Amino acid sequence: MSNDTDIKVFLDDYTQEKSIKKGEVLSAAGSHQQNVYFVEEGLLRTFYYEQGKDITAGFYVEGSVLSPIINFAEREASIYDIEALENTRVSYCNYTQLDALCKVSLTMANFTRYILQDIILEKNKRLAYFQYMTARDKYNALLAENPSILLRAPLGDIASFLGITQETLSRIRNQK
């Protein structure tokens, strides 16, 4: 079986589709999330509450993979809610099925490895945002990496994601 065929079979046979309306929660904090999501269309965000405040942890646009990997590894409940910021369509598969398929298909194991590499890179970028970057640098990095988020997500969610106030975000945007 060729690489492309393996992935096509996986997508056809092992994934399901789900539509989520704007404002709906795909997965709630406290759940034991067992799915890997592939964003086909739309925009999702992950968020959590800290001291009663809604903190955006990530944005996921078309082509993104969303996987609460710590839930699988540690068998812990998710701390994140996953919310649709637009009408969104995802494909998803159960992590256990994906893991089993990786054991019999090198192509799927490599596919999963690439997904995990992307997740790790995103987490490292996020860490760098908070350790090394000024507010302006954070904004510019988001603008360079995914400018559509700045047009599609509410400013409060963007400010929260960048770890700045909405007022600071407005000042930065007005200086451009």
Image: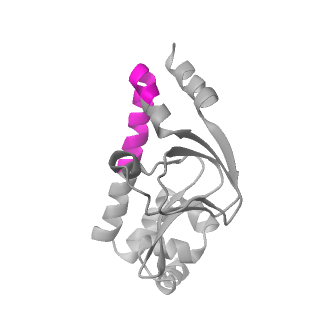
Q: Residue 24's image quarter?
A: bottom right
Residue lying at the far left in this picture: please name it: 131
Residue lying at the far top in this picture: please name it: 1
Q: How is the image coloured?
A: one colour
**Residue 69 at x, y percent in the picture:** 40, 48
Q: Is residue 131 left or right of residue 176?
A: left
Total marks shown come to 0
**Residue 86 at x, y percent in the picture:** 68, 61
* 74 lies above or below 24: above
* 126 lies above or below 163: above
Q: Residue 11's image quarter?
A: top right
**Residue 8 at x, y percent in the picture:** 59, 25
Residue at 70 percent across and 50 percent down: it is: 19
* 3 lies above or below 14: above
The one nearer the camera, 48 or 171, is 48
Residue at 43 percent across and 40 percent down: it is: 115
The one nearer the camera, 86 or 136, is 86
Magenta-drawn stretch, dominant element (helix, strand or loop): helix
Q: Is residue 133 magenta?
A: no
Residue at 46 percent across and 48 percent down: it is: 67
**Residue 72 at x, y percent in the picture:** 39, 46
Residue at 57 percent across and 67 percent down: it is: 150
The one nearer the camera, 102 or 161, is 102
> Magenta segment, which residues?
100-120
Q: Is residue 119 magenta?
A: yes
* 25 lies above or below 170: above
Q: Is residue 99 left or right of residue 146?
A: left
